[in-house]
Image (cartoon, grey):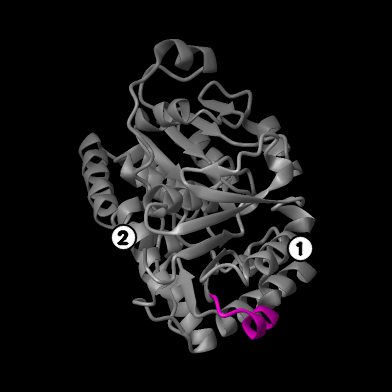
Amino acid sequence: MPSSDRVAIIGTVGVPSRYGGFETLAEQLVTRLSDRYRLTVYCSRPAYPERPATFQNARLRYIPLNANGPQSIAYDVWSMLDAMTSHDVILVLGVSGTAALPVIRRISRARIVVNIDGLEWKRAKWGAVARQILRRSEALAVRHADVVIADNQVIVDSVRERYGVEAQLIEYGGDHARRELADPVYFRSMGVPEGPYAFTVCRVEPENNLHLILEGVARAKALPLVAVGNWHRSDYGRQLRRQFGGRPDIVLLDPIYEQRRLDALRSNCAVYLHGHSAGGTNPSLVEAMSLGLAIFAHDVSYNRETTEGRARYFATASELAELLRTVSRGDLDQISAQMQAIAQRRYTWERIARRYEETFTGRSKGG
């Protein structure tokens, strides 16, 4: 094993993955690196009724707080304080608890690697106080980490301009998503159209622009849409469900947690609609690229960078409607092939794990 072989992974709900992008990242790092490192993954005790001591040779350490919501800062700080004297490397995913880094730097000799996520303080969902806390936390992370990781070149550029620090670009893998055949019985039970359809899946938040997608599909009258999301969690989602849920060309499905069924819905769509406008490199986008889906993405710099300008882009419902009305089968096939080629070159977990390993050993130089 390398000399810096004791690595703590902090900032996720835990493993096995049950939540989102950081949890998938943690699980993939465990899968690929636990034969070479003594890994500890910090997990939220309330999220795991059954609490095994290990997962794929990684040690699991349970903290009695929720990893998200109001307790997230305390959860991350508790995890870091617990890890700081018993690990050679502390990998922190997100900036919630990085206010503790100045103290940890004085006490611990651990190499600190921080993935600052997607400029979290810019997200519209945060109020003024939360935004200020996150902005301050990001500044502390950049100042006190040995290595700063950003998942999108746009964020790398922003960190350089704001702080004079060169962040390391490490994106996400998407090749854990698998092509699945259509399941006619399941599709019929969910109301999925028999012919070609557009598809989208995301948290139902304004910054993911479900209102633009639904309005664009309704205007285009070209392809039916299947949309998966947590429609009942917010006024925004409930309003969209009331407005569009009764249309025959729009199927609104609640969250689907079985990976194979979600992959089947994605794999068999004619076009994938990606409405995210914040957050850097979105895991759902690189998964869609790995599946070889034709992608229409919201026209922001993050999405153009992720897709290398080879997808199709929309900023308004009218632009999306026009794309849906005018795109040809040949265009979709070309986009599909280009997305998969980019994913195979950039968004494999083997490549991502290797880049993280470089930060653990010090071969990758941060700010």
For the point 42% across and 33% down, the residue is 198
Q: Nearer the viewer, mark 2 or mark 1?
A: 1
Residue type at numbered disc 1: Ala
Q: Which residues are magenta?
A: 102-110
Q: Is residue 295 left or right of residue 102?
A: left
**Would residue 348 be seen by someone viewing this image from the given angle?**
no
For the point 24% across and 56% down, the residue is 345
Look at the picture and state if 155 lies above or below 9.
below
Q: Which residue is mark 2?
A: 309
User: Is residue 217 located in the magenta-colored stretch of the structure?
Assistant: no
Q: CA distance from mark 2 to mark 1?
A: 40 Å
For the point 59% across and 64% down, the residue is 94
- Depth check: give the residue in front, 52 or 17: 52
Q: Which residue is mark 1?
A: 74
Q: Is residue 2 left or right of residue 40?
A: left
Q: Is residue 332 left or right of residue 133?
A: left
**Would residue 101 be seen by someone viewing this image from the given angle?**
yes
